[in-house]
Image: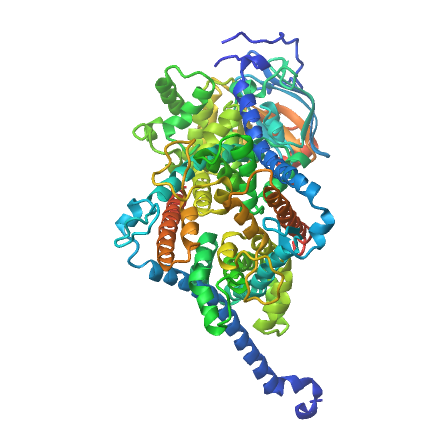
Amino acid sequence: MSTTDITADAVSDRQSRIARVVFFSCALVTVLTTFGIIAVLVTGAIPFFREVSIIEFFTSTTWSPLKEPNSFGIWPLIWGTMMIVVGSAVIALPIGVLTAIYLSEYASSRVRRILKPTLEILAGVPTIVYGFFAISFITPQIQRVFPQTGTFNAAAGAIVVAIMILPMVSSLSEDAMSAVPDHLRQAGYGLGATKLEVSTKIVVPAALSGILASFILAISRAIGETMAVTLAAGMNPNITVNALEEIQTMTAYMVKVGQGDVSVGSIGYQSLFAVGLVLFVMTLAMNIASQWIRLRYREEYD
Amino acid sequence: MSEQNVTQTESITQPQTTVADDATVEPMAETIIESRDLDVYYGEHQALRDISFGMPEKQVTALIGPSGCGKSTFLRSINRMNDLIDSARVEGELLLRGKNVYDEDVDPVALRRTVGMVFQEPNPFPKSIYDNVAYGLRVQDKDDNVDEKVEQSLRRAALWDEVKDQLDSSGLDLSGGQQQRLCIARAIAPDPEVILMDEPASALDPVATSQIEDLIEDLARDYTVVVVTHNMQQAARISDKTAVFLTGGELVEFDDTQKIFENPENQRVEDYITGKFG
Amino acid sequence: MATDQATDDRFEGFSSDDKLARKRLYGKLFVGICFLATISGVVALGALIADLIIESWGWLSWNFLTYPPSPSEFHYTDGRGAGIYPALVGSIFLIALTAVFTVFLGVGAAIYLEEYAADNYATRFIEANISNLAGVPSIVYGLLGLALFVRAGGLGSVLIAGALTLTLLILPIVIVSAQEAIRAVPDSQRRAAYGVGATEWEVTRDVVLPSALPGIMTGTILALARAIGETAPLIMVGAAVSVFNPPAGLFEPFAAMPMQIFEWASQPAGEFQHIAAAGSVVLLTVMLIMNLMAILIRNKYETEL
């Protein structure tokens, strides 16, 4: 049995202090990354907006920064992105929720254990492979039905992005629905409701915040989608409602600039950051909205 | 190892200095741990009120009382494990050999090298039996003759014979009672002065429990042992002194175990002991 | 006094079978629709796999794996002249390098957030920020990499610039999964170590990290499997499409599979479609192997505990 000094210099804890600093720096990298992204986008876009008025940027309906005659309206790109987003959402969100309802309320646990991970494989496929799939399979199939479809068309892009975001909607919605406590369902059955009624009128509303969050996440993903739309939907900034025509999304334009020999400092190079900034703001807004929804509705039935 | 950095204790009056009639006359054990007006808060909630008493060296002191009365909180205050809880706040003093462990210049890590702890649920590391016992030695830089010390500790913990051929196997492979003895071996390996035990047998079956109880009595030959228990019979069996805490974090009575259980001064203690509540 | 059931209004609902039958019909239709919805996802997956296999049939050969892409004219009588070798090796080097950076930064950040950080606004801000970073499109990370590493850092379009960019891209995912693994280590273990006089760092090093390691590895490998399929950041950083050798060093140009596939898929000539499919199969196979490794690790350690 020994007596020990318990004062502060008895044990040197320099290691813990160093460890704290090192690990804090690692966490700090994430904060710096965000600042870095904002700084890069803003400093890259400022020269652009010195040449191009913001008014023209947001009102002109032609986008042609690299070819004469130059025109710098962002709307064709935003429109192109929106065609993909709306198109894929219209397909994936309903199918995703219906899938989630089936998996959560109707499927046996064995079936669910097989189907849910299978669908999640879809989420793991790289977007470049989806792009290939679009031009290799989807577009030819569309052309069979609509022969006037171009090699590049918005529809193929929308379909393939829908397949890509489908598992996000279905998995997250299914998680939300499974989390709805069983006694709510029992209450419904006890009142004589059918399974259809319980699923649609009790479970879905109770899981709504999770379902909405999954929607927003999926939409955000669709906005930022790059390779599939570049390959499938094309490089033509064109405001149209015809999904069979070629369009260009914001991301596809960025790829085009990134691929080509655009000299640093030229208006083309700067446009890259201007478009990137718009893209970043859009996805940031979506992500904040998703977090807000999750926070706001968390108390639902706790 | 550096000399104790401690001021000599002045005479410390112990409450209830009467000794039971048939006790053998022994020199009064020196008080090693003394609590003075100790208050402990978790945020706004006060878990301990004005705790003042002294525990003797190399004896077993039991802390008993109903659930939630603060006895575990008090135990954790001795080795400053409460520091790990963000909302915990301590007022008053807790002296170890006369030095307040809550002084500015005290390092809790150093403190825990002289005050060891065994927890309610056995919690051996997912390492080998050998490495479990050796861990304390290694972090405290006492890693000369590790083999010897590991064997000694396992013997003291009455576990050596059962595990000596499987020191490399995982500590988690042992039974509950064995795991707890392993945790005891781990705690005594670095040779602390005090061993704190928070309901050490409550998660164990009766056979394992009685093994632990025998062990505790044996350990008191070399270490000061403070045991929290909700089992009054256990306290009566194994301890020399008993402190009774009651709901609200109050220390109601502290005396020789025999006196507490046969003839307590305080009516509430008598009610608790005879099972009227708690 | 008994009521005459035939005329009592209360029992009307019970005896009208049509309403109930119709409800049952809707119910069955509904299940059918939901089932079809679910199946459509599976069908899509099947079509994708079938398409890849069909298109790449005959083009996926040993030569394809070991030869570089053709310099000019396209010779593909036996796959020779159109190969994925530099891209395959480039991807592997790229991911290995990314792994090093990402594990260090990601686990470090996770340890800070779980073990050291107090529960205050700063910590919550950091975590919310990480959550946001996870949702930023990968092409924006490409811009960051381009401006920061390629241009400002003066590195040029080299392997390490690509790795750093991918590191930042997957860092949020790695941090979150490392956090979960660390959180799963029971507090009783930490208390045991503190109780025996260990310092904060010793508790982290000896108790938390060893227990959390399998979970951390699983999460990291899954994140790397995602990274290996990323194209957009590499386009921005400037991965090459016509190199004939694997990257010679950290500061050398590099090729990568997704980039190569993109290049091939962009060509109009039919033959390129086939090798784009073959390249996709190779990429997916590598990703599959990585995912299996992650699952194996998780299963092995979950049963041990």
Residue C93 image offset from top left, x and y in percent:
39, 37
Query: Which picture quadrant has residue B66?
Result: top right
Q: Quick check: B123 above or below B148?
A: below
Residue A49 image offset from top left, x and y in percent:
69, 43
Q: Is residue C257 left or right of residue A70?
A: left
Residue B276 appears in the figure: no
Q: Quick check: C17 above or below C34?
A: below
Depth check, front residue: B76 or B87: B87
Residue shown at 52%/66% (left/top)? Answer: A102
Residue A168 image offset from top left, x and y in percent:
53, 56
Residue located farthest toward the front when viewing the structure as drawn: A68
Depth check, front residue: A41 or A19: A41
Residue C164 image offset from top left, x and y in percent:
49, 35
Query: Which picture quadrant has residue A182?
Result: bottom right
The type of colouring in the image is rainbow
Q: Is residue A54 left or right of residue A261?
A: right
So how many labels did they put on this image? Answer: 0
Residue A148 appears in the figure: yes
Q: Quick check: B253 above or below A272?
A: above
Q: Is residue B2 left or right of residue B49?
A: left
Residue shown at 51%/36% (left/top)? Answer: C106
Depth check, front residue: C4 or B260: C4
